[in-house]
Image (cartoon, rainbow, N blue to C red):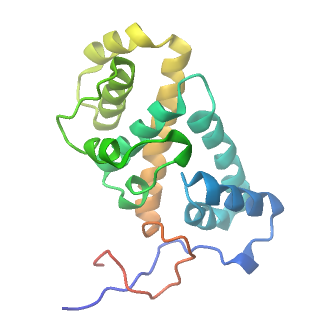
Amino acid sequence: MSIATHTPNVSQLQDDEVDDPRLADIIGRAEKTKSPPPSWYRTMGQNAEVATAFASYWELLHRGGSVPHEIKELCRIQIAQMIGCEFCSRQTSPLAEISAEVKNSCALPDWEHPDPRTRAALHYARTLTLDDGRDAEVYAELKEFYTPAEIVELSAFFCLTAGGNRMAKSWGIEPETGDVIPDGVMSIHAR
């Protein structure tokens, strides 16, 4: 059996390479919010201007807005699982207070959340991510529970989430360990 080593396509900044104070603050905040974690911003920090703008937009859509954070966090986890981003699906925002059982249930193809408002958002996340042709049905359900402004909020968040998941996979960010992952360490991915 050969051992694969981790060689990211975009490396993470080490502490001494973070020279933008705004980026340093974002990385510090990510230690607490966990979604996305510091390793995401250490990678995205290769372009500090993009990282800080992303963090601002992420904060607005994920923890801000009028749709509850818990609903958006469940949808974020479900999108990560559908896209197959292990890095993203392993994170959970502690502010959302989602149980491990509910988080793991999101991955089941036929699982339905007991709350109808949350279920409608999860159906929309699934349809938007998979482009499954259920738009009419899903929008009818959404309109029972969400205003047009909230639907726009969910749409923007889901698209940002899906794009972020694909970036994390493309960049080769390993699932969060809490540390900067140096090049050449053993990888969970066989490449």
The structure residue drawn at horizontal position 43% and vertical position 52%, both measured from the top left corner, is 165
Q: Is residue 17 above or below residue 50?
A: below
Farthest residue to the bottom: give it.
Answer: 2
Position in image of residue 108 (x %, y %): 20, 42
Position in image of residue 146 (x %, y %): 46, 13
Total residue callouts? 0
Q: Is residue 63 above or below residue 100?
A: above
Residue closest to the eye, 100 or 65:
100
Identify the image quadrant of residue 65: top right
Residue closest to the eye, 140 or 135:
140
Identify the image quadrant of residue 119: top left
Picture quarter with the C terminus = bottom left
The structure residue drawn at horizontal position 66% and vertical position 48%, both measured from the top left corner, is 55
The structure residue drawn at horizontal position 47% and vertical position 43%, both measured from the top left corner, is 161
Identify the image quadrant of residue 178: bottom right
Picture quarter with the N terminus = bottom left
Position in image of residue 32 (x %, y %): 63, 55
The structure residue drawn at horizontal position 29% and vertical position 48%, both measured from the top left corner, is 104
Position in image of residue 113 (x %, y %): 29, 29
Residue closest to the eye, 141 or 112:
112
Q: Is residue 1 left or right of residue 15?
A: left
